Amino acid sequence: MQAPKNIMVKVADASEATQEIKTISLASSDGAPLPEYTPGAHIDVVIGGGETRSYSLMPIARKTEYKLGVLLEANSTGGSKFMHGLNIGDQISIEPPKNDFPLHESASFSLLFAGGIGITPIMAMAAELQNTGAKFALHYAGRSRASLAFVDDLQARINDKLHMHYDDEASALDISGVLGAAPGQTHIYVCGPKGMIEAVQKQAVDCGYPKEQIHFELFATLSAQTGDTEFEIELSSSGKILSVGVGQTIIEVLEAAGEDPIYDCSRGDCGICQTGVISGEIDHRDVVLSAAEKSAGDVMQICVSRSKGGKLVLDL
Ligand code: FES
């Protein structure tokens, strides 16, 4: 992939939103406006060693700043630790905003679901829908009141359109009830953990929503899972055999071998890296493919998915 031109920014603010979530504002180093973005967009932050991590852009009035909400992940692979270690005045490099999760503003009604830190892109969408007078509702769910950030800000912005759900209180999110009560032609947006996305996807399909009206973004970084093992991939065009170690992705291995795989989100939610599989048993870890597509076993998202054991022969 051709790398976009990076921008140097400085940390203008870094403050605690909850015990585990920090709000970080980034300002242009020279006071000039930063590139514009649309609701649902994210930036990639360079965290060192050539690695980047994606963070969604929250609503902000100033054109010279970006605002991020960053959860300190218990099994951080570097990104959230780096972000939580930033101090006011630090300079960092970012890539310009990209949007893989855009709003469809012509929809007659928008139903927004956010789980935990997945609120950040959803909040930008809610602010836009409110500003344009569009009809929408936002369902924001989490473990407890203390775990959810930006609730006061949301209440001030959208008040009666905000519905809070706490797992530890009698207000847990009833996804099928919310979907069933929505008007026809509703577009659905969900950002949160994998389980929440899969539940909303499945129940929306069960309620008869076409795929084109269901939009999602996974809020998680890839991390090794207990029981992961090394496996081999074979590239069918060349017969080249490569080994994918524990903690490595197929994309990383391909790039290290001089191949040029196409990818974007690196977390299994955009579908860009989808690759044909000629043989082998796939351990699907994405949220792009339907249950039927996963069981067909002839394509995989090589940014996150692995082998269940033996060699995978890829259509590459
Ligand atoms: S790069 Fe987005 S699904 Fe793999």
Image (tube, rainbow, N blue to C red):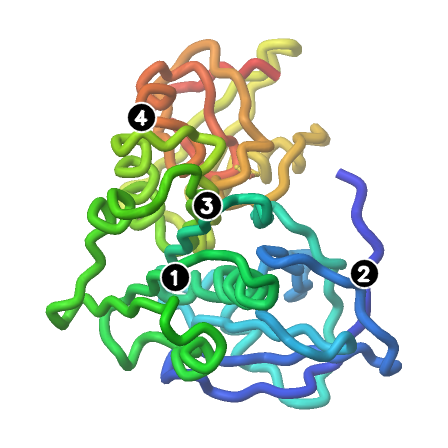
Provide residue 153's location: percent of width, then percent of height. Answer: 47, 81
Q: Where does label 4 land, which residue?
A: 291
The disc, 1 or 4, on the residue closer to the chain's N-terminal end is: 1
Residue name at image x 50 percent, y 69 percent = 80
Q: Where does label 1 land, which residue?
A: 138
| Secondary structure state at the residue bearing disc 1 | strand
Residue name at image x 50 percent, y 66 percent = 123
Residue 216: assigned label: 3
| Dot 2 amino acid type | Asn
Q: Quadrant of residue 180?
A: top left
The disc, 3 or 2, on the residue closer to the chain's N-terminal end is: 2
The disc, 1 or 2, on the residue closer to the chain's N-terminal end is: 2
| Secondary structure state at the residue bearing disc 4 | helix
C-alpha gap between disc 1 and disc 2: 33 Å
On the rendered structure, is 169 left or right of 203? left
The disc, 1 or 3, on the residue closer to the chain's N-terminal end is: 1
C-alpha gap between disc 4 and disc 3: 16 Å
Q: Nearer the viewer, residue 307 or 119?
A: 119
Contact, mark 1 vs mark 2 (Cβ under 8 Å): no
Provide residue 96's location: percent of width, then percent of height. Answer: 76, 59
Q: Where does label 2 land, which residue?
A: 6
Residue 308: assigned label: none
C-alpha gap between disc 3 and disc 2: 26 Å
Q: Of discs 1 and 3, which sits in the foreground? A: 1
Q: Nearer the viewer, residue 95 or 38?
A: 38
